[in-house]
């Protein structure tokens, strides 16, 4: 990791320099090639540490102030580590979602697949009357059917739009 340490109205001692480098090792483990810009300054009675980390096209920033410079540096490192972990987790989740949910099957492949379940949908099944089910289905014009528990019979039913576009069909189990 490339580290640039700057002191404003503060002399950077060898001890502070070593401490910053040692603490930035916690950040370095997340990246192969990263750069850090550290600015340390004093304002009134406060010691302010500002750290920018640039890696993989991303930029992370933390600024804290404390009575003690070392404590301020520690807080910055904790903040940066949290930001990096959050971004990494978000990126991994996006990659996982992209590979599983939006995996598109090419049209040639679809014609080859037969008798296979290629999509699964999950529905909330609530106990309602068939009349209420019709109203719920009318609220969702893109849906063609609604699965529900019939309050009158206690059984799972399906209400579906008929091809005429004006009427509905009810599917009930016999037993």
Image (cartoon, helix red, strand yellow):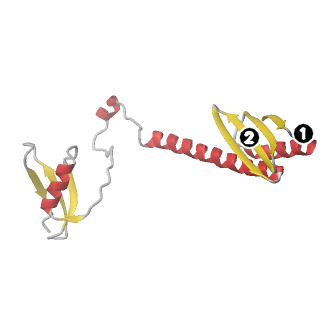
Residue 138 in the image, given as x and y percentages of width and height: 17, 50
Residue 45 percent coordinates (x, y): 82, 51
Residue under the point 59% across and 43% down: 87
Q: Residue 170, percent across and down?
A: 12, 57
- Tag 1 residue: 11
- Callouts 1 and 2 close, C-beta under 8 Å: no
Single out the residue that lies furthest toward the front. 44
At x 44%, y 43%, the residue is 100
Q: Residues within 10 Å of mark 1 (few under 14, many from 20)?
A: few
User: In which quadrant is the C terminus drawn?
Assistant: bottom left
In the visual, does 10 lie left or right of 169? right
The residue identified by callout 2 is 51
Q: From the viewer's side, name the closer residue of 75 and 113.
A: 75
Between 40 and 119, the one lying in front of the other is 40
Displayed quadrant of residue 104:
top left
Number of the label disc, if any, that sits on residue 64: none
């Amino acid at each position: 990791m490339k580290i640039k340490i700057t002191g404003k109205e503060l002399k950077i001692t060898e001890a502070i320099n070593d401490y910053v480098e040692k603490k930035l090792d916690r950040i370095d483990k997340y990246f192969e090639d990263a750069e850090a810009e550290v600015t340390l300054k004093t304002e009134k009675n406060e010691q302010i540490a500002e750290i920018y980390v640039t890696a993989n096209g991303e930029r992370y920033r933390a600024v804290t102030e404390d009575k003690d410079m070392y404590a301020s540096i520690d807080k910055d490192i904790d903040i940066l580590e949290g930001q990096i972990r959050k971004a990494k987790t978000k990126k991994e989740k996006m990659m996982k979602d992209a590979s599983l949910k939006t995996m598109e099957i090419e049209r040639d492949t679809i014609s080859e697949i037969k008798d296979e379940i290629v999509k699964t949908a999950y529905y909330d099944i609530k106990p309602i009357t068939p009349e209420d089910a019709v109203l719920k289905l009318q609220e969702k014009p893109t849906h063609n059917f609604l699965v529900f528990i019939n309050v009158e019979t206690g059984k799972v039913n399906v209400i579906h739009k008929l091809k005429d576009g004006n009427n509905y069909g009810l599917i009930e189990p016999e037993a």
